[in-house]
Image (cartoon, rainbow, N blue to C red):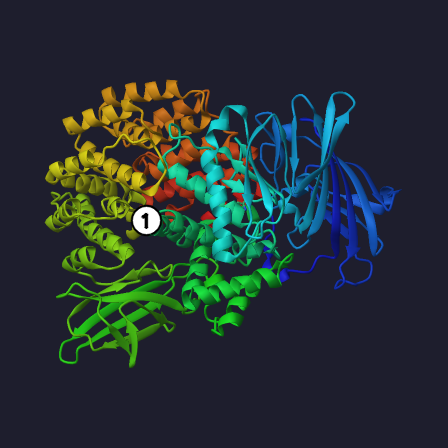
Amino acid sequence: PQPIHLHDYQLPAYRVTHTELKFDLSPSATRVVARLHLERHSERQEDNLPLVLNGEHLKLLRVAIDGQELGAGEYSVDAETLTIFEVPQRFLLDTEVEIAPESNTALEGLYLSNGMFCTQCEAEGFRRITYYPDRPDVMATFSTTVIGDAASLPVLLSNGNPVERGELPNGRHFVTWEDPFPKPCYLFALVAGDLEKVEDRFTTMSGRDVTLQIWVEKENLDKTDHAMASLKRAMKWDEDTYGREYDLDLFMIVAVNDFNMGAMENKGLNIFNSAAVLTHPLTATDAAFQRVEGIVAHEYFHNWSGNRVTCRDWFQLSLKEGFTVFRDQSFSADTNSAPVKRIEDVSFFRTAQFAEDAGPTAHPVRPDHYIEISNFYTLTIYEKGAEVVRMLRNLLGWEAFRKGTDLYFSRFDGQAVTIEDFVGCMHEVSGQDLSQFMSWYSQAGTPEIDANGHYDYAKSEYHLTLRQRTPATPDQHEKLPLHIPIRLGLVGTKSGDDLEMTLDGETLGKDAVIHLREEEQNFVFTGIAEAPVPSLLRGFSAPVKLRFPYGREDLAFLLQHDSDGFNRWDAGQRLAMLALDDLIAAHRNGVEKVMDVRVVDAFRTLLTAKVDDKAVLAEMLTLPSEAYIAEQQPVVDVDAIHAARTFVKQSLAVALRDEFMAVYGDHQSDVSYAPEPGQIADRALKNVALSYLMSIEDEEAVALTQQQFEADHNMTDVRAALTLLTHSSRSDLADPALKAFGEKWAHDSLVMDQWFSIQVTRPQPDVLERLKFLMQHPAFSLKNPNKVRALIGTFASQNRVNFHRIDGEGYQLLADVVIELNKLNPEIAARIITPLTRWQRFDETRQALMKAELERIRAEELSPNVYEVVEKALA
Ligand code: B3K
Ligand code: ZN
């Protein structure tokens, strides 16, 4: 497979102005009849441009132009294209193809999930449905007729509005849908099945009445309330915040069980992985409720950032994804606890996106080449893209930024555009020079900032030096200095308050942004009356690694006094990291481990002081994850990390047993479950406390955990308890609880996913055998992406000690699964392989074992997806 390059972009030779589709559904032989209204692009008037359409896995039955059937010499077909050698300036193209949804295990194009037909077309799935210019800059109105068996497929859905329906001979029926908004084919959707709906209404800001429907299998009708409420909140928020109104009379969400991603923003017909839409207090955790809210909002927000204004080509993917993630993050922050949302997003980002940026698949927010676009739905495109938009918002200020988004949406409505178009609007409304800022889109890798400061008593000045460097990434050796906004405060060590800052004679206030543009810059803050501790990169104002030689006292001080909630949390994480570093070294050197009393004292203060924001407190009490700790090490030693972290946890539990017990007791409640911030915070805090106590298998804690499990009050508490019982060293705790849970929920596939995940995160060494056994479980299937993620994905990414077993069996198991999935579902195969591609980070023995497994995969006949990832990993 050959890479495609951004610089080769060309306008499409032919535009489709209108698309008429007719589907005659059958699992093994669906007929798709297409009529495309085509015309030569006004800017592509070269002579004799052939018409080249994409099409894969299609059986071509008929092709005609303006009603004239084409003969053998007039066109050619290969595995990827249909080429018609001569066509008029404007014409109608009719094709008829046959496809087999039942044998489509890639879950791209039209496929079957639990007897229901559904589609996934982004990025390039539409070419598995019919011959078409499958690229986002070809936008057409669609009219779609779906024909199916009336008894087994009573519901027939597509984009837009239903305009006609009726009975047909042989027990079949049809519905015709019209979508008046021009769209690229990646936003096409079709669903047919035996579904039931819940319905609600929303009145838009201009007074239009919109019908909202969520379609699910009958047994899930009681799990849609939260998604519906989230949808209405998101619709209102987008009106209030961005002035964006919904544009069709109908908005539909459908839940399907087999889905590669979380969800898909098809115009008027969002298709969701059932895990991203269904919730019930007894089956979904607080985290799942919040995830559903965020994804429902994300897909809805795409209606403007993605659908009305879309991407010119797939290199611009972050134009819609980064912007839409930023929008959904802001929505969730406004709806829940804003500091906790930021803490969660950043701790995930610094763990997973930093690792991607430092690994063999590192790429810029706008990549300049790819082999398989499905491999680029990444943390860099999504999350780093969102950070870049957040920086723009912060650079411009909200009001100018909002003017910029208004201009962008109005100027480019109905068009397929580029990142330059977006940033251009921001420049136009603000007058700011964003040329250096553009490098954030083209340069891969995480900038590292070394900061140093000193206080000059005599002059009452604080001197801050910042030096930036972005390490080389595989395709980019030379890096330019970036424009990095650093939000900061100087916290007075006597007062504990933020000090007024003056820089170059300009008063900045107590919390301000300074701009690092050069490789190295000095900032001199004058009129600083007392020695400060700098609080840098507040709110994670740029996606960078920032080092500052903080002493432990400085960090303990910031943990108490920083006015920025995010940096208060981060100070605690840094303090814990210093202690962890020492313990990791002690473990490696076989020296006795000694707990740092300053960490114990800091935790005691946290546990006993009256903190109002309990959600933030729960985050502060959570130690950095093993994955995050690993990110900080030059060579990852999984065993030392695990041992050190366990030691810190147990030491804190022993030293602060009564304090943890009191926190647990104070946050017990039996009010009826609601996924609202106050309750969520209480549960989080209580369950963090319990996890400390269970780390030492405290007898009273064991009893409390069992009670919490048996009380079966809500899934958040049940899952927390079951996880602690399962992860304990005592099989008399783990086995009965797992058995009871597995039997109780055998009928509920989404709960069984949780049951799988909990078991494979066990730290005990028998987990690999258990994993192999669970792969034979009747509820497991390699064809279902949720199952693969729950069992294999969770094991490989979260059970670090066992995945990285020194005998290499963890690696071997993952490689076996990748080899199987490469044939069934290449998109999932290429994702699940990620932990193996990070071999550079480990010791030589593990490197060799991991590379050997990658080589074994490379020897197979590979899909472009897996090929691209493996080649990069072994390059
Ligand atoms: N736009 C979809 C991505 C689906 C792509 C799968 N290959 C989900 C989202 O970001 O909303
Ligand atoms: Zn998206």
Quarter-wise, where is residue 113 in the image?
top right
Residue 836 at what x, y percent from top left?
41, 42
Q: Nearer the viewer, residue 212 or 454?
A: 212
Residue 419 at what x, y percent from top left?
55, 62
Quarter-wise, where is residue 754 in the image?
top left
Left or right, residue 66 beside residue 343: right
Q: Residue at coordinates 47% horizontally, 45% vertically from top-left? A: 233
Question: Vertical placement of 796 versus 320: above or below?
Answer: above
Question: Vertical placement of 608 versus 428: above or below?
Answer: above
Query: Which element carries disc 1, helix, strand or loop?
Result: helix
Q: Nearer the viewer, residue 358 or 101?
A: 101
Question: Is residue 196 something one can see in this rendering?
Answer: yes
Residue 504 at what x, y percent from top left?
29, 80
Q: Which of 387 and 684 is in front in this view?
A: 684
Q: Mark 1 points at which residue?
A: 340
Residue at far front of view? 207
Question: Vertical placement of 563 versus 262: above or below?
Answer: below
